[in-house]
Image: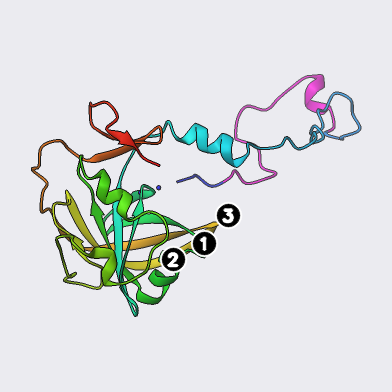
Amino acid sequence: MVTATGPARPGRAAPGPEASGPAASRSADPADPAVSAPAAPGPARPGPGPEEFRDAMRHWATGVAVVTTEGPEGPHGMTVNSLLSVSLSPPTLLISLKRGSRTQDILERTGGFTVNVLAAGQHALADRFTGRREVGEGEFDGLRARPSSGRGGPELDDSLAVLTCRTTERVGVADHTLVIAEVTRVRLPSAARSGGPLIYADRRYRGLGTEAVRPGG
């Protein structure tokens, strides 16, 4: 499914040997032609459009996960590839959700969710949780899953990893919300499964070191 040093203090030069000669007595008056004035900003250049940006980012390979949660209407799941490890101590991750989406709305009310990291070959499961559908038990009909042991959503069997998360912060960025969460529990039901994780790149689902297995939508 993401540190900077502080700026130098203005108006203070770095220590060093004193300058001598004519340049040392020259005033820093902006009217003095020997002193470079800041260049006037040029016209703003238009940035890339959504399609151009999407075409560029399709070359960035990611893993695939299904984020699940349990709301008043029942369980709900959504496929994501915008998952990022933030910190190891405490274990923290973030997911990016489109502002106004049902998943974002449900997570704001529940405060917890589960990340199910998918394995290679689980592209049908990834497809199942994309697009609009009714929230509730029907989303998980026919799937092998267990209830969360914490405040998250259903834990999908055969996932490579299952992480139960508690939301700690939400940050609005453009038309998305970054949901930052502490990982409260980790389970590795199929970590030893051969084939590795499911990968999404160039708009296709893939396995590590393999050709595309099918279009990814």
Using the numbered discs, state the Cα–Cα distance from disc 2 to disc 1 in whole angstroms.
7 Å
Mark 3 to mark 2 CA distance (whole Å):
15 Å
Name the amino acid, label 3.
Answer: Ala
At which x and y percent is residue 123? 26, 44
According to the image, what is the colour scheme of the structure?
rainbow
Quote the CA–CA distance across marks 1 and 3: 9 Å
- In the image as oriented, which residue stretches furthest toward the right? 31
- Asked which quadrant contains residue 122, the reply is top left
Task: Tell me which residue sits at (12%, 53%) in the image.
Answer: 188
Pointers 2 and 1 in contact (C-beta within 8 Å)? yes
Start-end of magenta stretch: 7-27
The reply to whether residue 113 is in sight is: no
Is label 3 in a helix, a strand or a loop?
loop
Name the residue tied to disc 1: 99
Identify the residue at image location x=40%, y=71%.
106
- Please provide percent x and percent y for residue 205: 31, 37
- On screen, residue 136 versus residue 30, left or right, reads left
Most extreme residue toward the bottom is 72
Rendered location of residue 3, percent (x, y): 45, 46
Task: Confirm whether the magenta stretch covers residue 33.
Answer: no
Residue that badge 2 annotates: 104
Disc marking residue 174: 3
Q: Nearer the viewer, residue 186 or 25?
A: 186
In front of the other: 177 or 92: 177
| Sooner in the amino-acid sequence: mark 2 or mark 1 | 1
Q: Secondary structure at mark 2?
A: helix
The three-letter amino acid code for the residue at tag 2 is Gln
Pair 3/2: label in front: 2
Residue 207 placement: quadrant? top left
